[in-house]
């Protein structure tokens, strides 16, 4: 993070302020339209909404499941969310128990769901706490009908030698099942000692009519189910970590995904012959494995593509002496959402279209200098997309200037980053299709 007005030299990836080239960094005065041609008081809300929606889309890339979930609080600093499909499970259990045993027993059925719900939360917290201890923050825990998902902030993943990485991934993966096994062992020991009438070894093991016994066996079943080598289950993640010892992460993920999808197909076939629940579990596993594979490919692209390959070299700038209405007028005629602020040949700040609109609504017309952000990150053109993504997400930024020898040579914004990622993904698909043909 740097502050305008200080000029430390750039060394490797250190932060600094820099001088902009006259060719790319000079302030353009090509737009001379009167600011009265755009009524910011009536149009600004629409532009602000579009900008907000765009930022939400970017943050949720690869985590479509989060868009269908609702917040349910925070535990140890980790956001807890419940997927909307989880409520279908509640309805299904209520109807099943009410039909089979009457409305009085339906409440015990929901209590059983509550036990499983709590066990899944503790399982996912195990993953989250171990990952945070390893330096990878957990962003959210999402509860699904067949289990939970812990969303880790992969952009904050520390760089470690390969040997340490696969061991760390195994520790994170097994943390959840270990929590469930501990709950089952402790609860089972307590019940055998103080409540032998629970009949711990009597079938059915998970049954709404015997909730204490269900607590033990549901946790044991949850642990064993997650240890199946069916990616993205925890056992599958252990398998991928073992594969990654001898191959890159994308190949390791694809191999684990293939095994996981084989298990998913087996579950669906068994479900068609016996229990519909197996079919549903197999379907969710199959889809989740595909999403995980896409996420791994996305992360691989982030690490291999350089900023010089995707940065914008033809971009608009603003001056600190511009009025907010003039700045908005220029923004209307530009596809950019974020702008470097240039004084002479120095970059002194950054400002977003959203911030211009907010300042106009709150205080009326003023100068860019008064509302621009004087703290900003910079990046070298040889840095990877992963590095830029970490800087953007770590401090909730939306623009990173790209420099070379303290000269502004381009910018990377969330807007052009995602457009470039889409084009890169498409070009890779075309090259792969050409090689296969």
Image (cartoon, rainbow, N blue to C red):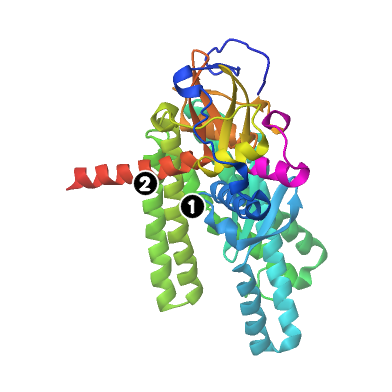
Residue 187 percent coordinates (x, y): 74, 59
* Residue 230 visible from this viewpoint: no
When asked about the image quadrant of residue 196, the answer is: bottom right
Q: Which residue is mark 1?
A: 232
Q: What secondary structure is marked by label 1?
A: loop
Front residue (pair 362, 248): 362
- Where disc 2 sits, the SS reads helix
Q: Is residue 120 left or right of residue 387?
A: right
Sequence-wise, the earlier of marks 1 and 2 is 1
The image shows residue 78, relative to residue 343, as above or below, that is: below
Check the image and report above or below for 16 versus 399: above
* Left-right relation of 69 to 111: left
Question: Among all residues in the image, which is located at the extreme left?
Answer: 437
The residue segment tinted magenta is 354-370
Please name the residue shown 62% across and 83% down the image: 96
Residue drawn at the location 67% of the way across and 44% of the way down: 357
The residue that disc 2 covers is 255
Query: Residue at the top extreme?
Result: 9
From the viewer's perspective, tell me whether residue 23 is left or right of residue 227: left
């Amino acid at each position: 993070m740097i502050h305008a007005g200080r000029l430390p030299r750039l060394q490797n990836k250190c932060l600094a302020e820099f001088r902009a080239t006259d060719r790319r960094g000079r302030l353009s005065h090509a737009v001379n339209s009167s600011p009265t041609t755009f009524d910011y008081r009536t149009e600004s809300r629409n532009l602000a909404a579009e900008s907000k929606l765009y930022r939400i889309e970017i943050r949720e890339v690869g985590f479509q499941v989060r868009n269908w979930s609702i917040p349910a609080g925070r535990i140890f600093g980790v956001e807890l969310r419940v997927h909307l499909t989880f409520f279908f499970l509640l309805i299904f259990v209520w109807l099943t128990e009410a039909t089979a045993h009457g409305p009085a027993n339906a409440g015990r059925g929901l209590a059983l769901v509550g036990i499983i719900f709590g066990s899944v939360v503790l399982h996912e917290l195990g993953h989250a706490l171990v990952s945070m201890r390893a330096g990878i923050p957990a962003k959210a825990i999402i509860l699904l009908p067949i289990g939970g998902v812990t969303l880790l902030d992969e952009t904050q993943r520390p760089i470690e030698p390969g040997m340490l990485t696969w061991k760390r991934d195994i520790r994170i993966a097994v943390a959840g099942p270990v929590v469930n096994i501990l709950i089952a062992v402790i609860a089972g020991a307590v019940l055998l000692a103080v409540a032998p009438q629970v009949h711990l070894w009597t079938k059915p093991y998970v049954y709404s009519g015997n909730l204490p016994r269900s607590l033990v066996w549901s946790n044991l079943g949850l642990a064993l189910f997650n240890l199946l080598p069916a990616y993205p289950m925890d056992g599958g993640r252990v398998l991928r970590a073992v594969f990654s010892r001898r191959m890159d992460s994308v190949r390791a993920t694809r191999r684990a995904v293939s095994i996981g999808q084989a298990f998913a197909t087996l579950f669906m076939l068994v479900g068609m012959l016996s229990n519909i629940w197996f079919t549903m579990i197999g379907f969710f596993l199959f889809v989740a494995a595909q999403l995980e594979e896409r996420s791994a490919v996305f992360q691989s692209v982030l690490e291999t593509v350089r900023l010089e390959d995707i940065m914008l070299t033809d971009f608009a700038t603003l001056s600190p002496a511009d009025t907010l209405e003039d700045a908005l007028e220029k923004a209307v005629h530009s596809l950019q959402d974020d702008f470097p602020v240039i004084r002479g040949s120095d970059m002194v700040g950054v400002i977003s279209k959203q911030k211009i609109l907010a300042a106009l609504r709150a205080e009326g017309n003023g100068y860019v200098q008064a509302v621009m952000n004087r703290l900003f990150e910079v990046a070298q053109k040889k840095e990877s997309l992963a590095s830029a993504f970490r800087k953007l997400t770590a401090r909730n930024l939306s623009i990173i200037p790209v420099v070379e020898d303290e000269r502004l040579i381009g910018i990377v914004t969330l807007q052009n980053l995602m457009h470039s990622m889409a084009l890169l993904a498409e070009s890779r698909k075309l090259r792969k299709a050409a090689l296969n043909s």
